[in-house]
Image (cartoon, rainbow, N blue to C red):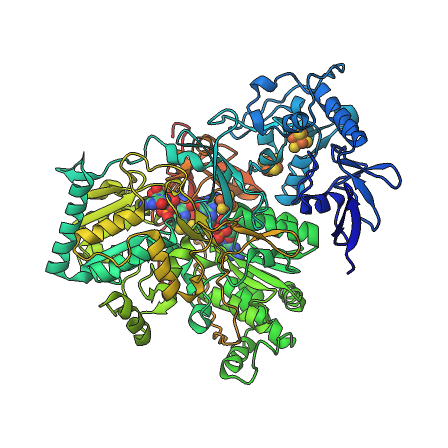
Amino acid sequence: MQPITVTLNGREVTGEPGMTILELARKEGVHIPTLCHESHLTSVGDCPSISTCRICFVEDERTGAMVTACGTFIVPGMVINTHSPRVLERRKTVVELMLASHPDSCLVCDKGNRCQLRQVAAELGIGLVKLQKIPQPATINDANPFIKRDLSKCILCAKCIRACQELVVEGAIDYFRRGFTAKPATFGDTALEESECTFCGTCVSICPTGALMEAEPLHIGTTGTVVRSTCPFCGCGCSLLLKVYDERIVRATPNKQDAISRGTLCVKGSFGFDFIHSPDRLTIPLIKVNGDFKEATWEEALDAVAGEFKRIKEVHGSDSLAVFGSSKCTNEENYMLQCFARCVLGTNNIDNSSRLHGAAGLTGPGETGGIFGTTNSITVLEEAEVILVIGADPTKSAPLVGYAIKRAVRCRDAKLILVDPRESRLALFANLWLRPKIATDLTLVNSLCKTVIDENLVDDNSVNRETADFKALAESLGGLDPAYIQKATGVAFEDLQHAARIYANAERAAIVYGSGVAQQVNGTETIKALFNLALLTGKLAGQSGVYALQRENNAQGACDMGVLPDYLPGYHPIADRASIRKFKDYWGDIPDKPGLTVFEMLTAAKSGEIKGMYIVGENPVSTFPLAGFVQDALSSLEFLVVQDMFLTETAKLAKVVLPAVSFAEKEGTFTSFDGRINWLRKALKPLGQSLPDCEIITRLAVKMGSPMSFMSPQEVREEIEKLIPMYRGIGYGLSEEPEFQPEGNGAFVKTLPMYRKQPEGTFGLLPARNGALPQEPDKEYPFVLLTGSNLFHSGGGTRSSRATRLSRFSFEAYVSVNEADAEHLGVADGDKVRVLSPAGDVVAAVKVTDTLPQGTLYMPFSVSVNPVSQLFDITLDDERKSPLIKAVKVKLERVGSDV
Ligand SMILES: Nc1nc2c(c(=O)[nH]1)N[C@H]1C(S)=C(S)[C@@H](COP(=O)(O)OP(=O)(O)OC[C@H]3O[C@@H](n4cnc5c(=O)[nH]c(N)nc54)[C@H](O)[C@@H]3O)O[C@H]1N2
Ligand SMILES: Nc1nc2c(c(=O)[nH]1)N[C@H]1C(S)=C(S)[C@@H](COP(=O)(O)OP(=O)(O)OC[C@H]3O[C@@H](n4cnc5c(=O)[nH]c(N)nc54)[C@H](O)[C@@H]3O)O[C@H]1N2
Ligand code: SF4
Ligand code: SF4
Ligand code: SF4
Ligand SMILES: [Mo]
């Protein structure tokens, strides 16, 4: 394409076709003020249906026309003035009109110097406005703890509306009325909490004035330091800007420069950070003396830990010790921790909590092709033509992925195939919604593969039909009988064929799976079957991908770093001699027998084989199934040390508690579920005497008399780069600026390494198995209860329940009941019921719903008031030893109103 030459303020400059005047000016370093423009939103420049700010007016000298810079494309020969007297006069008039209809509350407005209207007025030298004041509509009383609206300060730029509709695709707000009385409002002009609003905070961060503000701010006005970091909650890895004032994080906003999160966050990222300032934070090491915790110095605490670990190792051997590492800690900390377990304690008994949801993803494609988890980036997901979401609820559990899927459907016409027995929010967006019987996904996915083979939809570049594994797969699937499939899954065979064709015929297709399959009976097999489907149709990578959605902030990194009993860093199998040799060159002697998974460790603790345990950043007593058993197991230990920010239920059982800092008080990296390596930067000094996990582990190794070869996160990164090829380049980005570099299309992308290796046809298809169908509910327990994530909380709520605003919004425990079931049981909304499973019981309020099939109940995981995990026994997947904690058969009993 020919570049276009334009005269800009008397200078000849060139731009690309399709560029607006604003983009060209910005490229040339010419500042044009804007209020309604935002790079991630559609431009509204001259859109007649939306009133626009029109302060980016510029003149074209050839015609004398005034045009908006954001809404006008450059054409050859234009002669543009951005700051001529006429332009400035016009701009001033526009801003004066805005000020005339703006209340006089600037002096007391929380927005302070962050207000862009004030900034523009100052830039144009506008003093007091003499125009007649135009009264504005009254403010709205929202009762939620997140967002307050004062629409008298609204300048009708429509950024909030566009953000809600185009970026997060909630559609909670739109224009209410037109003309002078127009305002952005919810449907029916209700309070936000009565609308579809998820309190993601995106509109607040984008509003140029004080019209949309945080409710209950932790600080009024402008703050000094801004530190770029990464959200510590889910695996999406959103980029956060932490605003610091007086050693406190007072505000967290999205980083608009990040091409992945694009200026969006979810409610936890925007409003959940203040657990770091909770008065419950541990600030001093604790040692238990006669059953009570006593404060201790670091010397005393570390001496006690090192002394006990050494004693147990000497008396009972290294394998009587175990380490439970953390999917919340950084890569560097996790790397150090596994090194501590293997080199200092001398055991491979080390695991992390992704065992609960992610272990299934490590099998199959990991074993045959070295892909562990997700195979492509979230950007590629958004560009897919077809997205198959199975057993995942990303609008709640991974909101950034939810946004990407909804945008793909709404803005790019992607087809969504949803496989979920329950009506999740994505059902509204689905072209095809399959509602299988619970835990029958293996048969369902195998039947999709069957159609692909039967109808010759196989991609011959991806699969060699002559190989034994293809022949075995085709043969086993050939035996699957449509009548059986239909009966087993409850889905019509034609619908399954239709789904298989849509998926296979697309050029770019994605599979997104979650714990709705991974934590079910046959979970591991179902995930292998999903990989078979992707492989058969040539959709494993390239412009397609398989996305494993079951991640906490650094579950991916903890596994990559080798916090696993059977893999060394970078998934070098412990069973492989060559791997062991490679690592021995660096570390000296290491054990070569695979260790125990976390549930096996607990069983071994109970039976006395494991005597000492080191738990870092995990709270199994609150979050694992069968809390009583976990508690017993940990209490049977001779020695337990817990390293955490809080005195959790698990920490209470420890002999020594070591206070760790939060994500905001340390540096390091997290790996997102799709393999982006994101930085944490230190924004605050450690609270009290608490220390970063890295430092605690290093000091402990020294005390044990086996100092590790690295002392700082930087030194760890150097070793990680040497031993884990896919992390090469991890050191880049902290000190070297700019971290963001422009890409061809003008967007900004991170230049951190995308480490996922692209598969090169080395994958084997996996044999199709048809596991046993799950237990049907019976007379005694006639319902199946499903569990799922709670948007406002994370895990067991250790952190999110200490974030003041999230904790205020958490609801009481509830159980959703289908309308017909509710009628049959004689229960109504709000009635208290006892939910009983063979393992335990919980009390919850009824919420009648039409989103569930009859006979199915749903309870979101929530904070400690509602430990739904009490209902689960520990039943482990044979292959990966993961617990099946997604569905359980239960019965309901009414309880009196006094409960
Ligand atoms: N009630 C309930 N139970 C659940 C779930 C649920 O949502 N609700 N989900 C289930 C699933 S799928 C999973 S994976 C597990 C998740 O459960 P957990 O992994 O146990 O999750 P959290 O409750 O967030 O606990 C994490 C612990 O890590 C600590 N921590 C956080 N950051 C750091 C750090 O930087 N350093 C140190 N040292 N500690 C840190 C926190 O203080 C907290 O005690 O729970 C399972 N059980
Ligand atoms: N807000 C928030 N986000 C989180 C967490 C949190 O606690 N809070 N926890 C994080 C963690 S540790 C995890 S593991 C992930 C979990 O995140 P996801 O993997 O998305 O899991 P869920 O949110 O439980 O959603 C599971 C979906 O599967 C459906 N489902 C249930 N049974 C079946 C079935 O048999 N077949 C099919 N096809 N579908 C089924 C359910 O109806 C539900 O819609 O979320 C992470 N993100
Ligand atoms: S509330 Fe803020 S973002 Fe929304 S239209 Fe008004 S000024 Fe613009
Ligand atoms: S907080 Fe999020 S969901 Fe709610 S109105 Fe704003 S952009 Fe929409
Ligand atoms: S989507 Fe996940 S990473 Fe992003 S803000 Fe929400 S919790 Fe944080
Ligand atoms: Mo999880």
The quadrant of the rendering that contains the C terminus is top left
- Residue 864 image offset from top left, x and y in percent: 37, 38
Residue at the image position 59 percent from the left and 46 percent from the top? 262
Name of the residue lying farthest toward the bottom: 466
Left or right: residue 811 compared with residue 198: left
Q: Nearer the viewer, residue 546 or 150?
A: 150
- Residue 263 image offset from top left, x and y in percent: 58, 43
Res 72 quadrant in image: top right
Name of the residue lying farthest toward the left: 315
- Residue 289 image offset from top left, x and y in percent: 13, 38
Residue at the image position 66 percent from the left and 18 percent from the top? 103
- All told, the count of numbered labels is 0
Left or right: residue 643 compared with residue 765: left
Q: Confirm whether residue 91 shows in the render.
A: yes
Q: Nearer the viewer, residue 83 or 264?
A: 83
Residue at the image position 66 percent from the left and 21 percent from the top? 152
